[in-house]
Image (cartoon, helix red, strand yellow):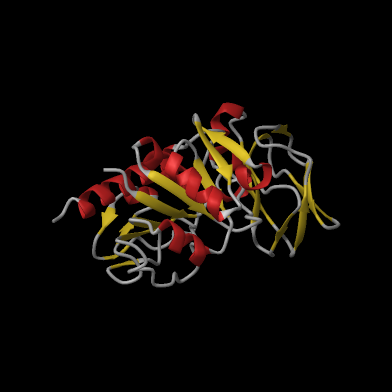
Amino acid sequence: MALRVLVRGVGDIGSAVAHRLFVSGHVVVVHDGEQPTITRRGMAFVDAIFDGRTTLDEVEAIRVDDLDALSTTVVRNTVVPIVVLDFSVVLGLIAPDVLIDARMRKRHRPETQRGLSRLTIGLGPNFVAGHTTDVVVETSWEQLGRVVTRGTALPLRGEPRAIAGHARDRYVYAPAAGTLFTSYAIGQQVDAGDVIARIDETSLTAPLSGVLRGLTHDGVPVTAGTKVIEIDPRGDPALVRGIGERPARIADGVLRAIDAALSQP
């Protein structure tokens, strides 16, 4: 049976979840803000917000700004609609069977969302199964994709997983609040020291050589400490596009959670 699913967050995790559920035959809508700072844009649907449409692993997503158009798109179910309209309005219109919070706000205490749909799922740390959401899906590599029906997921780990020997050093964070400007693109080859972007008058340089795996969209305002650039030292543009291993395994966990919860009488 096709379910109506509302996913909060259009980053690589939320996009992978939306993609997995869409190809499984469900009706999926993704909600996010007007100017998300998401960096892994080649691995997500986020560029539909800026460009009107995008494709991720052969699934098309389009930005929808009109409620009537959203209703029509949902009925047709041929693309994934991305919306930046008021969340409560979208929630009321869609009336989802499943609400998934994939915003990955790792250091925030999530609000209680139980009761907003038949099943609510929180992804990552700080969600509490049975309190903030009905269930939680683990996003930490140690127990990736595990469905938690009581208690919390693992706490936030301090360091990202290394790629080719590089962990935290492959990222660049905004040194101050401002608007990010860049002419670079995801997958582009860069050398250590290249000026990749600017936040107002401050230059942001590549910390090492490789390809751009992550880059916040040109013209987006950011706050101090926001992750805005990520370099993949392996240097292969193909590795920074499409659904990655971690998002795919989290998406599989979400599908298991839905099947288990909604198969019960």
Q: Position of residue 204 (x, y in %)?
A: 77, 50
Q: How many marks?
A: 0
Q: Please, which residue is most extreme toward the right here?
A: 201
The residue located at (52%, 39%) in the rendering is 163
Q: Position of residue 3 (x, y in %)?
A: 32, 48
If the image is split into quadrants, where does the C terminus sit?
A: bottom left
Camera-nearest residue between 131 and 30: 30
Q: Position of residue 247 (x, y in %)?
A: 43, 43
If the image is split into quadrants, where does the N terminus sit?
A: top left
Camera-nearest residue between 209 and 150: 150
The residue located at (46%, 35%) in the rendering is 78
Q: Position of residue 20 (x, y in %)?
A: 39, 39
Camera-nearest residue between 152 and 72: 72
Q: Please, which residue is most extreme toward the left here?
A: 265
Does the rendering let one see residue 178?
yes
Q: Quadrant of residue 201?
A: bottom right
The residue located at (69%, 64%) in the rendering is 223
Q: Quadrant of residue 114?
A: bottom left
Left or right of 258 in this view: 227: right
Does the rendering let one see residue 11?
no
